[in-house]
Every structure is written in C-alpha cells, then in structure tokens.
Amino acid sequence: MEFDSLLMEVNMSKSKLVLIAGNKSHGSGAHEHPAGCYLLADLLNNYVDGIEVTVHQGWPEDPKAFDGASAFAIYSDGGSGHLIIPHLEQADELAKSGVSIGMLHYAVEVPKEEPGKYFLDWIGGYFEMHWSVNPHWTANFESFPKHPINSGLVPFSFEDEWYYHMRFREGMKGVTPLLSTVPPASTMERPDGPHSGNPDVRKAIANKEPQHLAWCVERPDGGRGFGFTGGHYHRGWADDNLRKFILNALVWLAKLEVPKEGISTPKPTDQELEAYLLK
C-alpha cells in the first residue's frame, strides 16, 4: 500500500504528455503515425526526467486519458477527416484549462471554418486549402530565433514534404516562428489546386518571402501551442537536428525546461526504426 502511494506521488510529480497517433496511411516509411509516436514516447520516457508520455492510437475513448495532462500532440492525417473534428469541444475545454496542444505534419490541416478558427486559437496557425501548399523539397535552415524549442540546433538541411504558406493569426499576433526559410521556385511547378498552388502563394515565393515551417504560441489560458509541417518520412527521426527539434517542442509543450543544449538522444539505427513499424 505504501509502495502504491509512493508510485502515485512520483507519477503525479511528472508532467503528462498524451501523444495521439492516427492510422498509417501511405506506403511504408511515410505517414507512419503510430511508429513515430511510439518512438518519440520511448525517447522522452527514457531520456528526459520529469515527463510521462502515453500513446493512444486514435482519439482516446476514455476521457480520463487526459486527466492530469499538461499537453497533448497529434500526429495523424488531417483535412476534413481529421480525428480531432468530432472532439473539437472537448479539445477546446482542455485548451481553456491550460492544456498545451501540438500538431505534427498533416495534422496541421483542417477545414477553414470552425476547425480552422479553433486551430488559430490553440496553436496560432494551420494549413488552409487554396492558400497553403504541400510540395516535397529540401529546406535549408541557416539560423534559428532564440527560443527553448530551438535549443542546441545547428544549421541543417532536410528533404521532406514541407508544407508552407500557412494561415496564421492576423498580423502573426502571438505567433513565434521557429523554422523559417525561403522555398525555391521549383516548389511552384505544379498547377494551381487545393494543395498545390494558388495566386497568393505564387506571389509570396516570387517575392522570396520567408515561409514558417514550424511555430509556437503561448496562450492566455496558460497553455502552449505548436505546429510543425514536416514529418512525412519515418526516417526523419534519425536526423539529429530534426529529432532534437521535435523532442524539444514536446518537452516545451509539457511545460518543462528544455536544456540549453536541447534534448540529446542516440540516433536510432535503421533496424530500430524498422522495429517501430511493426508495432
């Protein structure tokens, strides 16, 4: 009994992060949402003190899954079938209680009506069809604004499906860009379409306007928000900078202090990455 009480005290002293994985939806190695969430959870639970990470495949059916949570983050497909859409009111109640919210890759896309308004409140921005685009390209990150999420990063490049030209709050109010770069003109070679191009984004790229591929907010309710447009490939978690960046972000969402050098973890081997695909 005394041991159970001690264990409960230890768990209550930890910051709880809930990772919500959508189904894997592409060919092997892409949109591996469960594998990515289990990998990130293991890294955080094994290498970061003071955090407890749980993983749920799909929106948790048990509302107690969020009891005591400091944050939740979703790594899933998005659009009109986004797994959060049937649960917008529950998610908003969590946000209003100070729970931080993060969205990774396709999970940043929702319809611009009610879901989009919630995303502007919760995380500061989202992918809006006929405004944002989703090309595959190599982004070069040469410098980083000072923020705990960027701790320990060095200049790096990575090829991914980097969405850009996000719909942000008016005037970027309260939004802190984290990863920004100027996409090459080659990202505009596709014809106009809901995800491929539009006059507004073409003008922005012609003017060489920097695009923000990751960002964060601190909300008046005490919660935090984070959006990240990369994460298409499972192999991305082997990139030391990309992995550090996301782990930093998840720790920051959970309202823990990010070390000055960032969250350092061993590079997963090809075999280890493959093993997570079988979970």
Image (tube, rainbow, N blue to C red):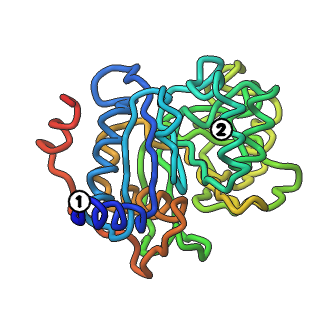
Identity, as a three-letter code, of the amino acid under mark 1: Met
Q: Position of residue 174 (x, y in %)?
A: 79, 62
Query: Residue 1 bears which disc, if any?
Result: 1
Mark earlier in primary sequence (1, 2) = 1
Q: Secondary structure at mark 2?
A: helix
Left or right side of 65 for 5:
left
Which residue is at the front of the view, 181 or 89? 89
Residue 118, by quadrant, is top right
Identity, as a three-letter code, of the amino acid under mark 2: Ala
Which residue is situated farthest in the left direction here? 271
Residue that appears at 21% across and 63% down: 266
Left or right side of 155 for 49:
left
Q: Nearer the viewer, mark 1 or mark 2?
A: 1
Residue designated by label 2: 91
Residue that appears at 61% across and 37% down: 108
Q: Position of residue 33 (x, y in %)?
A: 38, 33
Disc 2 residue crowd, few under 14, some 14–19, many 20+, Cα 10 Å: some
- Separation of marks 1 and 2 at Cα, in angstroms: 35 Å
Q: Position of residue 74 (x, y in %)?
A: 51, 39
Q: Is residue 92 above or below residue 218?
A: above
Query: Residue 222 bears which disc, if any?
Result: none
Which residue is situated farthest in the bottom direction here? 260
Q: Is residue 168 above or below residue 20?
A: below
Residue that appears at 42% across and 33% down: 21
